């Protein structure tokens, strides 16, 4: 009898110890001191979520999706840092209230004027207005108002340009942007328990693994402050535009083209920020490095401001590439963007706001170096931990995709790197305290998640308390990640095309005959593309031949074998990646073969810029 009692006591004590251990682990995933209700029914996958530390051989391991931890073996090689900078700021403008600014001229101005007498003036910058119609794609300047050191001026417009000149020439020019608070009628939140704010900060071409490797201070800050880390955030399209639009509209690329084919203004009402604006939120958006073709520039941008506050006219004052940097006057463009995002959240912290800010300039091109923004970005996030914004604001720090081209695309691990952008999420302190649903967010760090899910999630934030939920048109069975996602979820369930799916390990191809057939199919597909390319007069695309097979791997689906191939063609030494499906003796290229080489400058004879990657131009006459 005593033995049985001792055994029972041991079992009970062990169960209590086990339960307390995992309760403490969950609390470690949150802000210290915050408690939530935890279900007693915890399966193995939930325990693994709580103890995942990055040393495992997988990113997630569920019945529906297994993704290897490719970052353990992939070595990132960023560009060499060139000792250039945007310049030294000599005129400082401070926002001292909602209506006024204070201008201070630093002694540094003497270095610009070389000791000569100088005079300074400021101009407000606004979008161009032609025949009463405002066009955000062009700008105009007010007359230049002279000012002296330590001058107080009224904040009439958000954008200001300062010029200082000697008798001979302009010696100093800089640009500044501040949020000018709007005042409008308050909306009654009769159907909403708590108005949650939303801030999206996007960083182009940034996988989770690249962030950890190249921006260690930011990555460490996010870990230390218990931001949620979604390790299987999966892209759904090739480049920035389809992935950002999936996030903003819940639509795939063909659906976006159908609705936005004339202009972006035509479909602004289906963007997330428009839903938030209709709900009474103040909205803002901004994107730097305007000349990039991947995001909204290809559609010539928005003619009308898509949000209450819009940064594009500011960057039109002049962006220049200097070494590794993209500068707007005396500061990196991304620093302007971060400061404006911070100003926006502070300005409306007692109201409701939705902001989306996207920066390309420290990560998009191969000469950009993420390390150069690392310290500033960590400080940016740290500010939120001291100003009270985090109590009622969801913050998403995410990307569109990983590295798509360059030498880093040769290793087989780059297959995953390209397809798995980062997604970190701050969940408001008040939400963590109030809702048991926070447990679902913890669980979903180890689930397959897509931009379609994030679209639904952000809409659901508007509907918390109403028990209603919007769907994604491209993925009707995608869900808000506030609900627990199924561990059985596959790429097919999440409407991720097989071409982009990461939910499988790759193994080296060993069947030489089948591999050759797969390569032949990929090259034939490439030839079909080249045959249809239209070029300028007296030019044509060269006939390409296989120069080298860079890698060949396979994985199996239920009814087929998929070959993942990278190969280099000549002339031009342009490399491509293709996914080829084998069913019996039939080999079919999935989606379109894509280039993984650096931007092809020898394809400039094509009429459609999309075809540049496939063409090596040769003269005929």
Image (cartoon, helix red, strand yellow):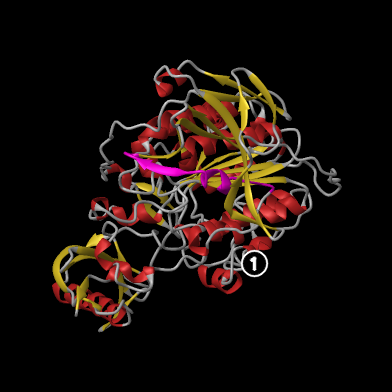
Q: Looking at this view, is 325 or 117 the one in front?
A: 117
Neighbour class for label 1 at 10 Å: few (<14), some, many (≥20)? few
Q: In which quarter of the image is the C terminus?
A: bottom left
Give the number of callouts. Answer: 1
- Residue 334 in view in this figure: yes
Residue 202 pos. (x, y %): 51, 46
* Left or right for 58, reference 175: left
**Residue at left offset 64%, top offset 28%:** 34
- Residue 213: image quadrant is top left
Q: Looking at this view, is 394 or 183 the one in front?
A: 183
Q: Looking at this view, is 427 or 567 the one in front?
A: 567
Does residue 97 belong to the magenta stretch? no
- Residue 553 in view in this figure: no
Q: In this view, does 602 lie above or below 116?
A: below
Residue 376 pos. (x, y %): 46, 29
Q: Is residue 159 above or below residue 64?
A: above
State the extent of the magenta-drawn residues as a range.
308-324
Q: Is residue 442 above or below residue 93?
A: below
Considering the numbered disc 1 on the image, is that residue within a helix, a strand or a loop? Answer: helix
**Residue at left offset 86%, top offset 45%:** 188
Which residue bears the numbered disc 1? 266
Residue 453 pos. (x, y %): 57, 57
């Amino acid at each position: 009898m005593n033995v049985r009692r001792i055994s029972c006591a041991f079992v009970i004590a062990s169960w209590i110890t086990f339960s307390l251990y995992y309760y403490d682990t969950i609390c470690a995933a949150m802000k210290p001191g915050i408690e939530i209700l935890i279900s007693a029914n915890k399966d193995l996958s939930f325990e693994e979520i709580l103890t995942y530390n990055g040393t495992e051989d997988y990113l997630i391991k569920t019945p529906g999706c297994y993704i290897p931890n490719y970052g353990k073996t992939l070595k990132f090689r960023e560009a060499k840092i060139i000792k250039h900078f945007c310049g030294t700021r000599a005129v400082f403008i401070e926002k001292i209230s909602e209506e006024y600014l204070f201008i201070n001229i630093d002694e540094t101005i003497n270095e610009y004027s070389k000791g000569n007498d100088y005079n300074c003036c400021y101009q407000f910058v606004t979008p161009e207005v032609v025949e009463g119609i405002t066009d955000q794609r062009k700008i105009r300047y007010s007359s230049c108002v002279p000012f002296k050191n330590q001058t107080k001026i009224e904040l009439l417009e958000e954008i200001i340009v300062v010029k200082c000149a000697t008798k001979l020439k302009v010696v100093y020019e800089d640009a500044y942007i501040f949020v000018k608070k709007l005042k409008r009628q308050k909306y009654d939140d009769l159907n909403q328990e708590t108005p949650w704010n939303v801030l999206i900060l996007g960083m182009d071409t940034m996988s989770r693994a690249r962030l950890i490797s190249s921006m260690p201070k930011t990555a460490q800050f996010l870990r230390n402050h218990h931001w949620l880390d979604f390790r299987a955030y999966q892209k759904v399209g090739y480049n920035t535009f389809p992935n950002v639009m999936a996030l903003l509209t819940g639509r795939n690329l063909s659906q976006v083209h159908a609705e936005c084919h004339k202009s972006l203004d035509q479909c602004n009402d289906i963007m997330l920020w428009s839903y938030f604006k209709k709900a009474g939120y103040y909205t803002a958006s901004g994107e730097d490095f305007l000349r990039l073709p991947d995001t909204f520039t290809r559609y010539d941008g928005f003619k009308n401001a898509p949000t209450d506050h819009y940064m594009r006219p500011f960057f039109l004052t002049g962006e220049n590439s200097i070494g590794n940097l993209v500068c707007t006057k005396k500061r990196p463009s991304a620093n302007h963007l971060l400061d404006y995002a911070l100003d926006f959240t502070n300005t409306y912290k007692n109201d409701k706001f939705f902001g989306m800010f996207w920066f390309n300039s420290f990560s998009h091109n191969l000469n950009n170096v993420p390390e150069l923004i690392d310290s500033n970005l960590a400080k940016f996030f740290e500010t939120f931990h001291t100003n009270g914004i985090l109590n009622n604001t969801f913050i998403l720090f995410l990307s569109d995709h990983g590295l798509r081209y360059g030498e880093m695309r040769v290793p087989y691990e780059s297959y995953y790197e390209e397809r798995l952008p980062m997604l970190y999420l701050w969940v408001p302190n008040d939400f963590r305290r109030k809702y048991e649903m926070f447990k679902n967010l913890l669980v979903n760090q180890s689930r397959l998640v897509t931009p379609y899910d994030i679209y639904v999630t952000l809409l659901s934030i508007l509907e918390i308390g109403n028990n209603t939920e919007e769907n994604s048109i491209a993925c009707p069975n995608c869900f808000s990640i506030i609900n627990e996602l199924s561990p059985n979820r596959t790429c097919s369930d999440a409407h991720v095309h097989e071409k982009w799916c990461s939910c499988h390990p790759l193994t080296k191809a060993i069947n030489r005959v089948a591999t050759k057939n797969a390569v032949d199919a990929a090259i034939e597909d490439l030839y079909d593309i080249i045959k249809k390319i239209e070029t300028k007069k007296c030019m044509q695309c060269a006939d390409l031949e296989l120069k080298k097979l860079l890698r060949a791997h396979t994985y199996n689906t239920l009814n087929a074998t998929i070959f993942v191939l990278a190969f280099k063609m000549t002339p031009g030494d342009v490399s491509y990646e293709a996914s080829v499906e084998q069913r019996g003796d039939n080999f079919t290229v999935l989606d379109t073969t894509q280039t993984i080489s650096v931007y092809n400058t020898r394809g400039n004879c094509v009429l459609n810029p999309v075809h540049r990657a496939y063409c090596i131009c040769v003269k005929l006459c």
